[in-house]
Image (spheres, rainbow, N blue to C red):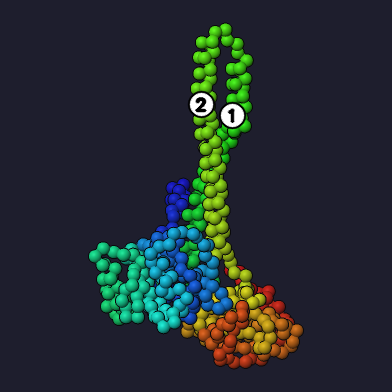
Amino acid sequence: MSDDVEKQSEHKDKPEVKRALNGSEIAVVLDEASLVGARIDKIYQDTYDTLVLELYQPPAKHYLVINFSAYSHLYVKSEHPKKYTKSLRFKELLTAKIKGARIITIDYSPYDRSVVFHVKRQDEEYRLVVLLWARASNGYLCDDTWRILDAFYRKKDGAEARALTSYLVQRAESSSHQCLDMTFSPINDSLNEAVKAYYCKEEVTKSEPWLDELRLLKARYTEALAKQVSEETLMERWHQVEERFFTQSFVEHQAYQKAWQAHQQERQTFFARAKQEKQRLIALEKKIALLEKKIAQEQNRFISVKKERLSPTFLRFKVEDWQILVGRNAKENDLLLRRYSRGLDYWLHAHQVAGGFVLIKYQKGAPLLDSVLQCALALAHYYSKARQQTEVEVIFTQVNALKRTKILGKVEVLRAKTLLYRYDRAFIERILAEYQAEF
């Protein structure tokens, strides 16, 4: 019995194996992100294996994180802590060539771990090729004729060019490859959220010991600083030495000369030591100030990483295995549509009245149940300004028929149906009491 418990505890203590994304996961993450049409505002390269693109797609910014390490992956997040590191070669090239460009199309397939971003700035077109091939990962910036301008990793004897050529040859045959199952479990029906939470967790686990180490170092310096002798104390000691010397009486002049020489030598030694102590004191104060700044930066980064993993604030209902998500204000509506919706999800909103977005998550191969639609209509009426009306018209369409505007939480409806809903107080009270689910 005790052996079983020990084995279980050992299994729990084992760290989770870090892994790279497969083609299916990359395709789903990019489907959820909907980055076509986004503008590339800035490019960051905080580490030697990670590239971050700051994208603006009205009305919000996104940060596309691309990692070229052995655990290659990509995901989208809403915030990115700014780091002031020296500029690196590939990042500078991207800034010069594609900063301000728009993403025209994105080519990717669930059968291959590669992504091609077609970007255009004025009359210039470029292709940003991302190969997430674990240890063979690399990124390329090419012109519209596939000529390589530069690579993220430069290899010996032009090996990076041969890798891209091999990719272009095999590109047409990618559909014959095996489509792997997803290893990540979606969070709130979003695989991007699961991937982000997993790799952000890695950042958090790296930040915590680094913060502890910085704090310990600061404590040591502070303790050393407390033991340092101040300049005032040193001067008091020297005045005491001088007072002792000048209160002495000498009978012979030769004895006085020897004592005076010894006193002068002691004076030089004393002030040389005092100068060293002062320099050491200044150096310790500088080190402590620098450590305090580093700790503050790391804490801000730690907070921003944890903030990325906070649960959303909108409401979630579950009706007969169908999920219904409800936004209650402009910010929640925008978050709902931007991060938690996909093209085939059903969208409802009170017609010509301010109110919350209601999403019914699409289920492949399952027709939408009338009971689920009635619940969504009731929620669209309840979370709108027309709550006091007994009848209200509700717009019903799919997310792919919506176009976001520059105004937060507002959309343009390209095609839709209008359904009439009659208020039933007992029905909405039952929905709120029985069907609301937690994240």
Q: Secondary structure at mark 2?
A: helix
Tell which of 386 and 426 is nearer to you. 386
| Residue drawn at x 55%, y 38% as measured from the top left | 281
Three-letter code for the amino acid on which mark 2 is drawn: Gln
| Residue drawn at x 52%, y 47% as measured from the top left | 214
Quadrant containing the C terminus is bottom right
Three-letter code for the amino acid on which mark 1 is drawn: Leu
Tell which of 342 and 286 is nearer to you. 286
Tell which of 319 and 128 is nearer to you. 128
Q: Which residue is mark 1?
A: 234
Q: Earlier in the sequence, mark 2 or mark 1?
A: 1
Residue 3, can we see it? yes
Number of the label disc, if any, that sits on residue 268 = 2
Single out the residue that lies furthest toward the left.
157
| Residue drawn at x 36%, y 73% as measured from the top left | 141
Q: Residue 182, image x and y in percent?
A: 42, 71
Number of numbered tags placed on the structure image: 2
Residue 427 versus residue 99 in the image, above or below: below
